Image: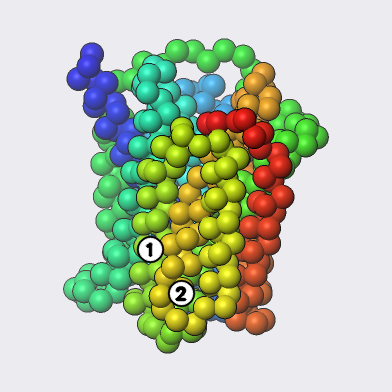
Amino acid sequence: MAKTNKIAIISVMLCFFCMGFVDLVGIASNYVKEDLQLSDSVANIFPSLVFFWFLIFSVPTGMLMNKIGRKKTVLVSLVVTILSLMIPLFGNSFAMMLIAFSLLGIGNALMQTSLNPLVSTVMGGGNLASTLTFGQFIKAIASFIAPYLAMWGATAVIPSLGLDWRVLFAIFFVVGVFSAVLLGVTPIHEEKIEGKPSTFVECFKLLGEPIVLLSFLGIMCHVGIDVGTNTTAPKILMERLGMTLNDAAFATSLYFIFRTIGCLTGSFFLRVLKMRTFFIISVIMMALSMCGMFFGHEKWILYTAIALVGYGNSNIFSMCFATALESMPKKQNEVSGLMIMGLFGGTIFPLLMGFASDAVGQAGAVAVMAVGVIYLFTYIKQLKTETKN
């Protein structure tokens, strides 16, 4: 039984790695922009499209889990993700990339909603928090190696392969197939889920509760800043330092490196500090970052700013999520569905940032993200001074 549990944990952790595939959208949209000669506002449609599907699929995924089980739902998400990674291997036209990014978003919406409950099933309630934290660390590995794979593909792949930077999709495709096969053959016992699934009506009614609405908006800001930095950081370096896209792609990896460090250390700080205190520290770091990215014209300033927002934004989701769940313990399924729908912020922010950067340069995109940081400052008063995670 122990051996089976270990295999199940390994297969689930590999799924977390696949969950991180969604973050390739930042660097990939920059290469698509360059290949197809798109404007910022048009190129930012791609990351926006990826996160649009969280609005549509998060609650239905909860209902699907009740019907077919958590493992099968994760398998469905992997199949959709694999299809999304296969499409760019046959071309990078605007239409093909739209379809690929749409499927990537749908697959990730299914995975984000179903994978964490599957971890709970595998662990049987033991060491769940630490396992989820480690899962986020595994997810972040995929996030920060994506730019390196794209850079390698753009500069080193044999031309006859015809993949250039899209070798990123080929490598992740292979990992996705292996992950799906491993999870498929791994036996995981699931108890039947009792109670009726959440509905759209039940979820949206809860937005009438101030703390649920404010937490929902907080998660929208978190994801908007996350996707926005992922997409915009290389553009800032190209605009102000004259870097090529291949050189500037390091900015995306730098962001994810510090977000990974934040995930690992945040679980410790949230045990020894009050949640409110750590939230304040995190948002201050993000505010300093916005100043650096808005005004900075030197490499060390911009790199420092990118690192600050990577660390500062790494635990905002978990703190907003926990605050919302604790506020309504009898409605956690509905609240969970709403919080996942908050990832829709990854659609709104890049669209607004694209229009702003087309109008006034990348400083305009940073200003849009700064609005999200300002909102997070207003959210601080929702956190009780005595609350710990």
- Please name whichever residue, 74 or 24, is drawn nearer the observer in this view of the structure: 24
Above-or-below relation of 299 to 67: below
Q: Residues within 10 Å of mark 1 (few under 14, many from 20)?
A: many
What secondary structure is marked by label 2?
helix
Task: Inspect the image, locate mark 2, and give the three-letter code of the amino acid beneath it.
Answer: Ile
Identify the mark at residue 301; answer none if there is no mark. Answer: 2
Above-or-below relation of 2 to 129: above
Task: Inspect the image, locate mark 1, and give the three-letter code of the amino acid beneath it.
Answer: Leu
Instruction: Look at discs 1 and 2 and give the one toward the viewer.
Output: 2
Q: Is residue 207 left or right of residue 144?
A: right
Identify the mark at residue 254; answer none if there is no mark. Answer: 1
Kindly identify the residue that appears in the image at 21 percent across and 74 percent down: 156
Identify the mark at residue 20; answer none if there is no mark. Answer: none
- Please provide percent x and percent y for residue 37: 49, 82
- Please provide percent x and percent y for residue 298: 45, 81
- Please name whichever residue, 292 or 3, is drawn nearer the observer in this view of the structure: 292
Counting labels gives: 2
- Please provide percent x and percent y for residue 56: 63, 43
Kindly identify the residue that appears in the image at 56 percent across and 64 percent down: 288
Kindly identify the residue that appears in the image at 41 percent across and 78 percent down: 299
Q: Earlier in the sequence, mark 1 or mark 2?
A: 1
- Please name whichever residue, 70 or 121, is drawn nearer the observer in this view of the structure: 121
Above-or-below relation of 345 to 208: below
